[in-house]
Amino acid sequence: MGEILLPAIGVVVFYLLSGLRVLREYERAVYFFLGRSWGAKGPGLIFLPPLFAKMQKVSLRVMALDIPPQDVITRDNISLKVNAVLYMRVKEPVKAVIGVENYLYATSQLAQTTLRSVLGETQLDELLANRDKINAILKEIIDTRTEAWGIEVAAVEVKDVDLPPEMKRAMARQAEAERERRAKVINAEGELQASEKLAAAAAIIGREPAAIQLRYLQTVNEIASENNSTTFFPIPIDFFKGLADVIGRRSEAPAAATPALPASTGGDTVPAPPRRSRAKLKA
């Protein structure tokens, strides 16, 4: 009897020990007993009846899926290549195993199709300027579709946008033209502000006659500080204006009257005798 009992106990002990499994903190075991799902177990030490139960390990860590470059035609008919990266984690292990055959492959394909469809409705300028908004739209769409698979999408990031060479040249010309426009606008604004300040300074100098003399002395001091052999002395324009006024008043004075011959007392003026020529006088 003992010879039969000891081997039986050894077989039972071996059967129990062979059914023990150790799972890490980030792992869960979806096990099936006689083909039927009995939920998920773990982490730590678990027991699965050998020959009758099978399990499939699922990691709960965040995984990064690289979305390969996709050929996209934007809404403004520009062809480009775009790739992205998807961050996801398994939220419900049972759904991830039962709801879809391969949740990693299914999520990757869904991300590729969603990327093409979303960028196909977006213009190039919006893609380059509002990338955060596009990432949020991609995340929302993919997360909604994968919720039935027990997948939670943490983030979707568009990495590279490969533009055609002719489009890069066109964008470079556009950027150069925009820079030139800004430079011209800034220059015009500077000229406007300078003219306003000059007008204000001229008004102040016009109200104070001594200010123009002080400005004159300051200009002479600045010229003399450069150690030049020739010094220019500017003459105020008002000096020429006063001189022109004096000359104008003199030219407007009335001319002196020519004296008339005196009249005779008898009435009519006696005409003077005609003057004889030198030839007659000599004769």
Image (cartoon, helix red, strand yellow):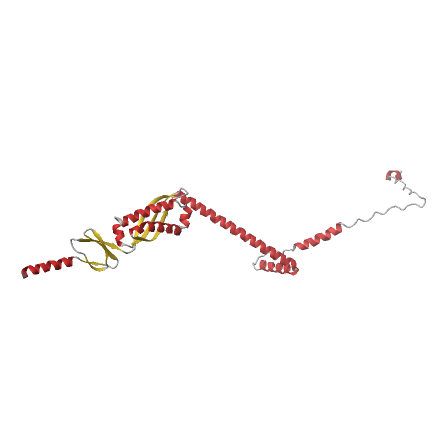
Residue 200 percent across, percent down from the top left = 60, 57
Question: 111 or 39, which is in the foreground?
Answer: 39
| Apparent side of residue 237 relative to residue 129 in the rendered image (left or right) | right
Question: 281 or 195, which is in the foreground?
Answer: 195
Outermost residue toward the right?
A: 266
Residue 201 percent across, percent down from the top left = 61, 57
Measuring 12% from the left and 58% from the top, which residue is drawn there? 12
Whether residue 231 is visible here, answered yes or no, is no
| Apparent side of residue 30 relative to residue 216 in the rendered image (left or right) | left
Measuring 58% from the left and 54% from the top, which residue is drawn there? 196
Outermost residue toward the bottom?
A: 2
| Apparent side of residue 56 relative to residue 166 in the rendered image (left or right) | left
Residue 58 percent across, percent down from the top left = 25, 54
User: Picture quarter containing residue 217?
Assistant: bottom right
Q: So how many labels did they put on this image?
A: 0
Considering the image in quadrants, where does the C terminus appear?
Answer: top right
Residue 178 percent across, percent down from the top left = 47, 48
Whether residue 211 is visible here, answered yes or no, is yes
